Amino acid sequence: MTDLEADLRKAVRGEVGFDVTSRALTTMDASNYRRVPLGVVAPRDADDVAAVLEVCRTHGVPVVARGGGTSIAGQATGTGVVLDFTRHMNKLLSVDPESRTAVVQPGLVLDRLQDAAAPHGLRFGPDPSTHSRCTLGGMIGNNSCGSHSVAWGTTADNVSELDVVTARGERLRLGQDWAGAPAGLRELVDGELARLRTGFPELPRRISGYALDALLPERRADVARSFCGSEGTLGVLTEAVVRLVEAPPARALAVLGYADEGAAAEAAAGLLVHRPLTVEGMAADLVPSAAALPRGGAWLFVETGGSSGSEARARAEEIVRAADVLDAHVVTDPAGQRALWRIREDASGTATRMPDGSEAWPGWEDCAVPPRRLGAYLRDFRELLGAHGLRGTPYGHFGDGCIHVRIDFDLLTRAGIGRFRRFSEELAELVAAHGGSLSGEHGDGQARAELLPKMYGDEMVALFERAKAVWDPDDLLNPGMLVRPAPLDTNLRFAVLPREPVDVAFGYPADGGDFSAAVRRCVGVAKCRTTASSGSAVMCPSFRATGEEAHSTRGRARLLHEMLAGEAGGVVTDGWRSTEVREALDLCLSCKGCRSDCPVGVDMATYKAEFLHHHYAGRRRPASHHSMGRLPEWLRRVDRVRAAAVVNALASVRPLAALAKRLGGITPERRIPKVATETFSRWWDGRNAPGRNAPGRNAPGQNADDAGDLVVLWPDTFTEHLSPSVGQAAVRVLEAAGLRVALPPTVHLEKAPVGDGRTVALDPVSLLRGRGRVCCGLTYVSTGQLDRARTVLRRTLDLMSPVLETRAPVVVLEPSCAAALRTDLPELLHDDPRAACLASRVLTFAEALEQFAPDWRPPALNRPVVGQTHCHQHAVLGDTADRRLREAAGLTGDLAGGCCGLAGNFGFEKGHFEVSRACAEEQLLPSVRHAPRDAVVLADGFSCRTQLEQLAGVRGRHLAEVLAEALETSPEP
């Protein structure tokens, strides 16, 4: 391997990676399979590709071409050298609106082509659900399709010419009329014309095998079309000329409700006469909530186009009238259509979990039958599942007869793997009996190639082998795929994982307490590799900032997988002490975006905390873990000795500030935030001192029982010590809404507070235990100090015990702290029932007003808003109540998505500043720069406000502050 690596470094200008991280990142695609490569090369151009092939041929090492790595049949993995085209050969070379063509490199992400074509009213027809991260090279290799194939066909239908390099270094330009055909291919076809004319099933989604019938003379001997779907086994693509189609100016979406998937499948083929753009199907068990859908147990998503909105709607309504449905909706609003399509696009990830939470896997992901036979096929498919005791949730391209499904195979035990094989063999026979194709979109790879004789027969498969030998006589390119395949039950990705649960700190309740199962959640769908954020999405800001696979959620999950594999065959062999895993996790912002945006709910923030906990156990921690991880302790000490003014003064002296930052592991580009000279709790105590007639207190003669509901306002570290104005504003608004406000106890009480919730009954034992402060443990968790976090959280539960005996909600103003209490607390203290109880009580500021003061109306501001929804609020808490509160206050406009980039300690840590700034520049800072002059800049998180202040010189405010200010200026009712 050393000689191979050295020879490659001499021969190519692109990067050559034989290191642990490079290899670990490419062991898997989105399939059930895993192969460990020798190394990875990111070629810069076709010359580099030819050089790699020459070196590898000399060494007898196979080569695998890889795009986005979202293949579901295992064809993007290999044991030799992997070519990564996403790093350099990812350009859109030209778009020609006149000829409706584009010239692309193989690593170009599909959405980038769509973005460039859209201003000309054009688009590339095929659009897999992975359109935001799949590459054109991968689409050509798999002959991908997508939801619009009923209108615009497969990738092969939209390819004009292809530039490829063969295994022996020959450069060919493939096209029609035998253009670019390698020597011997024409002779092979001429000798098998009868077989090629009769040996292929006629159906729109026949992807399995080689498309040798495209070489028939009546089909203009289209070598480029024949190359599509060859899964990198015939040659390596370096450039493509693709055809574009005219995009309808307007679209409408008819959502048709049926009793069940069988009824929807039976109806799908009959809708094709109306020339729709899509006919997609899915059932209720894949839909998180059917509230936005018409009545039914299954639905068809039928999209129509038109030159105007009214024309598109008329076509959709025509389809509704023609369809025999239980119920139907026609959606013309683009935002509404996007929301519905998002449900369908996330299905490939959502389907990896059954309704009861058990795992489901690809393997028989995309069989296709003639559309008219889809209903009958689905019934037989369901019977076969039942006969094997398996479960699956079919969905997909009903109009093309192509069904996607994840099945709850047991791929961890010998018995389960045996059942997987038997089911696969019987399903292949069933598909062939219905005149179908084993693959209708994703290719054969290792998952199905072994069973191609059941579809084509031995003689046709032998012809495929002969064709492969013409193109690649040395079997250098992606061996084991399509011809002479590896058995479908070998190289399974789970074989190397530990069989016994790993000793971990978090409870992982959704994964049965098994950290391996949590890591297995990542199936490689790679939504985290989306290159541009849109809407409210957050995941994955570090990948978008760096473009590096290692800094994506999937990349980190791959490294953790290899770490767990360890000595059993993993690439990472030093376990929790791995520097490679630590470095990959270093740029994880712990934004928790993946917890909500990942279709399978990967929670990399938790995995990172878990890893850091083990990695630094008994070892010296980075300075930032002490300076910022223990921030609540330092700030309480400053408050205890009333030293805030002194600390602020010292921090304003540049040499002293520089020294403090260097000692604390803080990046020099950051300014140290000022500490409040009066904490929120001191303000509260002074406000509620005896004799003070504080606003919100019961009026003379008024009973406490007649006042509003009691809410407990959580004094988080940021509100308490750094932004007390937020707490003060929240108190003003909550009391104006008629609520009674109390703070959590600061002593461990033997019985609950009395009176109005502000006073407590003490006994001598309570006094001896001393005062304390509640804390969500966020800073300890984010730095992996989980033992300390547990101690802090148990003390917090002790303090909150009397509150938990009441019905009072706990209102948390800082979104990150609220998210920590909702998720980290019960998962870290899964053995303490009080943790789940407190988590269930946590409300955001807007939720508290909505639930406990539903009749209160905020003052009308009637101004636009800009800013960003906090990433933890997006991922864990939700912002529906906030949207409604803003709307009620006349605050118009949507907040940006993404992550501000500061993310607690992340943006302050040395080495993170550039990534932190890049994240802010993606959505937050542009939204503020282009905001109307009278816009309100909202930022509920302290990190978000700090980022705005330090990078844009703009003061962001919590929603509570904005409403409180309006209350001060609005006339009394």
Image: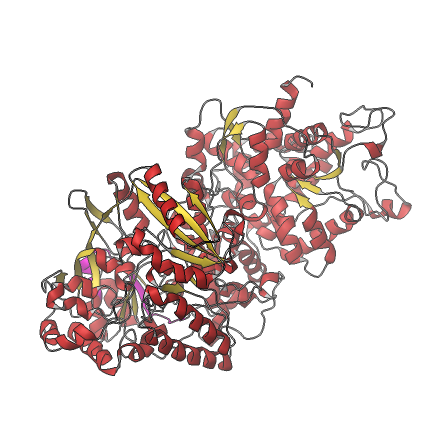
Q: Nearer the viewer, residue 76 or 659?
A: 76
Q: Nearer the viewer, residue 217 or 174?
A: 217
| Applied colour scheme | secondary structure
Quadrant where the image shows the N terminus: bottom left
Task: Point out residue 195 in the picture as x, y percentages from the top left corner.
Answer: 17, 77
Task: Point out residue 915 in the picture as x, y percentages from the top left corner.
Answer: 43, 45
Quadrant where the image shows the C terminus: top right
Q: Nearer the viewer, residue 375 or 741?
A: 375
Q: Vertical placement of 497 versus 89: above or below?
A: below
Q: Is residue 402 visible?
A: yes
Tell me where the magenta segment starts and ends, as one range: 33-52
Q: Is residue 307 magenta?
A: no
Q: Quadrant of residue 493?
A: bottom left
Q: Quadrant of residue 570?
A: bottom left
Q: Vertical placement of 792 versus 29: above or below?
A: above
Q: Vertical placement of 738 versus 202: above or below?
A: above
**Picture residue at 22% right of the left edge, 55% below the top:** 158
Q: Is residue 135 visible?
A: no
Total residue callouts: 0
Q: Nearer the viewer, residue 870 or 661?
A: 870
**Residue most toward the top?**
971
Q: From the viewer's perspective, is 694 left or right of 179?
A: right
Q: From the viewer's perspective, is 875 left or right of 269?
A: right
**Picture residue at 43% right of the left edge, 81% below the top:** 422
Task: Point out residue 539 in the picture as x, y percentages from the top left corner.
Answer: 46, 49
Q: Is residue 48 magenta?
A: yes
Task: Point out residue 327 in the picture as x, y percentages from the top left corner.
Answer: 48, 50
**Picture residue at 30% right of the left edge, 47% below the top:** 112
